[in-house]
Amino acid sequence: DTGVSQDPRHKITKRGQNVTFRCDPISEHNRLYWYRQTLGQGPEFLTYFQNEAQLEKSRLLSDRFSAERPKGSFSTLEIQRTEQGDSAMYLCASSSTTSPGELFFGEGSRLTVL
Amino acid sequence: AQKITQTQPGMFVQEKEAVTLDCTYDTSDPSYGLFWYKQPSSGEMIFLIYQGSYDQQNATEGRYSLNFQKARKSANLVISASQLGDSAMYFCAGNNFNKFYFGSGTKLNVKP
């Protein structure tokens, strides 16, 4: 399978706990995006990387959220001290500079904060 | 920033008929792209079609075509010969400077 993969697919946690999601993009893609999607809404941009550099972060991304892409390959999104409002689907997508307009999405990581 | 508006929360279409899903955008940037994605109940976002702001002709991909009207800032998706498997959420999106903005989506139901 050469698509975008995300892990875990589902995560249930208690409020106040930390969670981490991983995304493995398509191998030749140098751009990686994180989005958050709540029920009935479109994906909201959180942050994106070009190679290992984090080029932009949304104002939606509070200090409790941090994303890394240490070697320009896989990325992690960590949420510290989770709140019930963090419950959502976290989508990862990747694209290449040769075809920058097309995003390839993973299947998402669904977070439920109790 | 770019704003994407989809005013149809839900649409019904009879199998084998055509359907148009509306999308308007608002941007001051001269160079942008417009996209449509399909999200079935499984949750995965599937790329359907792309239109660049400088493209002279409307984009087509199989049964999908994009009715791009620059003056009206609209980029409507037309699905011809609807199939039951087309039932899904459809999102219009635009990009500026490598950031993608999505509309709130239209839920399409194809009736047999």
Image (cartoon, coloured by chain):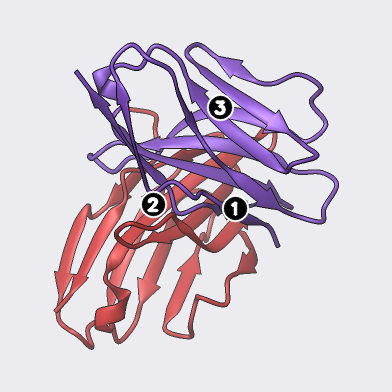
Chain colours: A red, B purple
Residue receiving disc 1: B4
- In this rendering, the label closer to the viewer, 1 or 3: 1
- In this rendering, the label closer to the viewer, 2 or 1: 1
Q: Secondary structure at mark 1?
A: strand
Residue type of the residue flagged with mark 1: Ile
Query: Of all residues shown, which one is farthest toward the right?
Result: B30
At 31% from the left and 50% from the top, the residue drawn is A108
x, y percent for residue A102 = 58, 35
Residue receiving disc 2: A23
At 58% from the left and 71% from the top, the residue drawn is A58
Chain letter of the residue beneath label 2 in the structure image: A
Q: Is residue B11 left or right of residue A112?
A: right
Q: Is residue A74 visible?
A: yes
Near-viewer residue (B27 or A58) = B27
Q: Quadrant of the N terminus of chain A?
A: top left
Chain letter of the residue beneath label 3 in the structure image: B
Q: Is residue A29 visible?
A: no
- In this rendering, the label closer to the viewer, 3 or 2: 3
Mark 1 → mark 3, Cα distance in angstroms: 16 Å
Q: Does residue A23 sit above or below B48 in this rendering? A: below
Q: Does residue B13 sit above or below A58 in this rendering? A: above
Near-viewer residue (A87 or A28) = A87
x, y percent for residue B46 = 41, 33
Are circles 3 and 2 on residues that touch, CB within 8 Å? no
On the same chain, marks 3 and 2? The answer is no
Marker disc for residue B49: 3
Residue type of the residue flagged with mark 3: Ile
Q: Secondary structure at mark 2?
A: strand
At 39% from the left and 11% from the top, the residue drawn is B81
Marker disc for residue B102: none
x, y percent for residue A55 = 67, 63
